[in-house]
Image: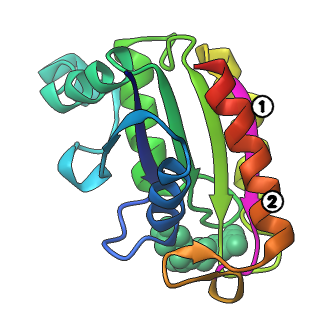
């Protein structure tokens, strides 16, 4: 059976992106899912001086191992001030020091959501441009706007948006 990992680009305990990531992964039939949480991979703030003095932390390799052992990745990025959250950017920077081809060519469903009407489109654009330079194979993309209205009791309630996501899930599943 294929194995996928899913996580949010957020360290919030109540992350709406984690809710979306877990929901999306539940729609992929016949795969084993591992849900990751950035809080389980605590890291110092990246800095070259820290790296020279102490090397790359074990948690970076642990996270990388999850990517390596997966057949695909579902990620939902939280947007802070139009960009990655600090927690995700920090992890990404560390990962890129350990492995420049960070995403190792794995098929990726790239998503974002926010309470606002743009649904994290800015961070989605940033990642859509950047991740392929780190060997991400983005096969599907989805943005969920107005999370509070469109996502209730664990699922997307807006039928058009749900249909859109199911299309993206289909593309992702086919690529595994
Ligand atoms: C510092 C900060 C900046 C934010 N900037 C944005 C933003 O640029 N765009 C947006 O849609 N939401 C923004 N938000 C709201 C987040 O989308 C919201 O907090 C969301 O719950 C974050 O996702 P998460 O719950 O998965 O962490 C911001 C929130 C914080 C705390």
Which residue reaches farthest right? 160
Identify the residue at image location x=82%, y=78%: 117
Membership of 145 in magenta stretch: yes
What SS does tag 2 mark? helix
How many residues crowd around disc 2 within 10 Å: few (fewer than 14), some, or many (20 or more)? few
**Relative depth, front residue between 138 and 32:** 32
Which residue reaches farthest front? 30
* Viewport quadrant of the C terminus: top right
Identify the residue at image location x=30%, y=52%: 37
Report how far apart the C-alphas of labels 1 and 2 lie in the structure: 25 Å
Query: Magenta residues, as a range?
Result: 138-147
Depicted 102 relative to depicted 47: above or below: above
Membership of 155 in magenta stretch: no
The dominant secondary structure in magenta is: strand
Task: First in sequence, mark 1 or 2: give its number.
Answer: 1
Residue under label 1:
129
What SS does tag 1 mark? helix
Identify the residue at image location x=41%, y=11%: 99
Depicted 72 relative to depicted 156: above or below: above
Identify the residue at image location x=71%, y=37%: 170
Residue under label 2:
163
Q: Viewed as shown, does residue 169 lie left or right of 53?
A: right
* Viewport quadrant of the N terminus: top left
Q: Which quarter of the frame holds ligand 1? A: bottom right
In the image, the residue with mark 2 has its CB under 8 Å from the nearest atom of ligand 1 = no
Q: Is residue 122 visible?
A: no
Q: Position of residue 112 (x, y in %)?
A: 65, 57
């Amino acid at each position: 059976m294929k194995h996928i990992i899913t996580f949010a680009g957020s360290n919030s305990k109540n992350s709406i992106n984690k809710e979306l990531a877990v929901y999306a992964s539940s729609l992929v039939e016949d795969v084993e899912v591992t849900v990751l949480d950035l809080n389980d991979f605590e890291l110092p703030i990246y800095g070259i001086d820290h790296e020279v003095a102490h090397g790359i932390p074990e948690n970076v390799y642990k996270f990388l191992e999850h990517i390596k052992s997966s057949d695909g990745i579902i990620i939902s990025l939280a947007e802070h001030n139009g960009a990655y959250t600090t927690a995700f950017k920090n992890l990404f920077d560390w990962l890129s020091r350990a492995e420049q081809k960070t995403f190792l060519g794995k098929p990726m469903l790239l998503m974002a959501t926010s309470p606002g009407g743009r649904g994290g489109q800015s961070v989605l654009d940033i990642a859509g441009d950047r991740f392929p330079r780190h060997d991400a194979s983005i096969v599907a993309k989805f943005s969920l706007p107005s999370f509070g209205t469109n996502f209730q009791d664990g699922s997307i309630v807006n039928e058009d948006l749900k249909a859109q996501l199911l299309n993206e899930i289909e593309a992702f599943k086919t690529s595994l």
